[in-house]
Image (cartoon, helix red, strand yellow):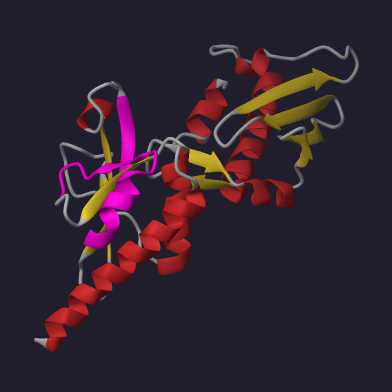
Amino acid sequence: MDRFAVKIFKNRFFDKEKLLKFGFKKYNNNFFYFETIVDGQFNLIICIKDEITIETKLIDCISNEEYRLHLIDGVEGKFVGKICDIYENILKEIADKCCKRMYFSSLQANRLTEWIIKKYNDYPEFLWAKSPDCGIFRNKDNEKWYVVVLNIDYSKLDKTKKGKIEVLNIKVDKEDIQALLNTKGLYPAYHMNKNNWVSVTFDETVSDEKIKQLIDKSYILSQKIKVSKKLK
């Protein structure tokens, strides 16, 4: 990405439905947007290749060659400045209308975060200064956690693997744990009670729909804590 895109789209990812609503067209799983700018002198072509990758080209309508002076630091001039302003404003509009905030590092974690926000109106809380990329979701009725997102070394879950990975800790019924741990991508909970929690890797191994089911169950279990206290 160029210097404008890096700044504008930092900590954001693209919403495909919003891209289409904005005016992007889908071709072979990529999304394209075309606009003529600077009084018809240039054609701006924008390609969104996945949820975080954007590529742009500015084509001179007379020479049919790519124009790149607006992307070079230190280049000055009234005409280049005008192009920079128009180009930057278009990207900002796309960011405002077609993007969602990235709360976490993995795309899967962010997709599910948006789902949690929409369904439960719960936003992630980042409680640890030393681990700013780790967050929790809590039940508003009783303040109990039902989701914990952690960024850890894979070896914490599997001694045969290394490297950073984002994981989801969720509460489960004790009687379901053994069956869940037979599922690829699920592990005994890291840093939580292994009798009541499991860890799920955010690396697309487990489908979004399966994780949504697990989150729903964890949310219900967090509600039961409140109910059991009331009965006492």
In the image, residue 214 lies at what x, y percent? 38, 58
Q: Is residue 13 left or right of residue 120?
A: right
Please name the residue shown 43% across and 35% down the image. Answer: 203
Q: Position of residue 179 (x, y in %)?
A: 33, 51
The part of the image, by quadrant, that contains residue 161 is: top left
Q: Is residue 6 left or right of residue 18?
A: left
Residue closer to the observer: 197 or 67: 197
Q: Nearer the viewer, residue 86 or 156?
A: 156
Residue 42 visible (yes or no): yes
Q: Nearer the viewer, residue 171 or 147?
A: 171
Q: Is residue 67 magenta?
A: no
Q: Which residues are magenta?
A: 164-192
The answer to whether residue 140 is visible is no
Residue 93 placement (x, y as % from top left): 63, 44
Identify the image quadrant of residue 143.
Answer: bottom left
The percent coordinates of residue 176 (x first, y second) are 29, 58
Residue 62 against residue 185 in the figure, above or below? above
Q: Which corner quadrant holds the N terminus?
A: top right
Query: Residue drawn 17% across and 49% down?
Result: 194
Q: Is residue 121 above or below residue 29?
A: below
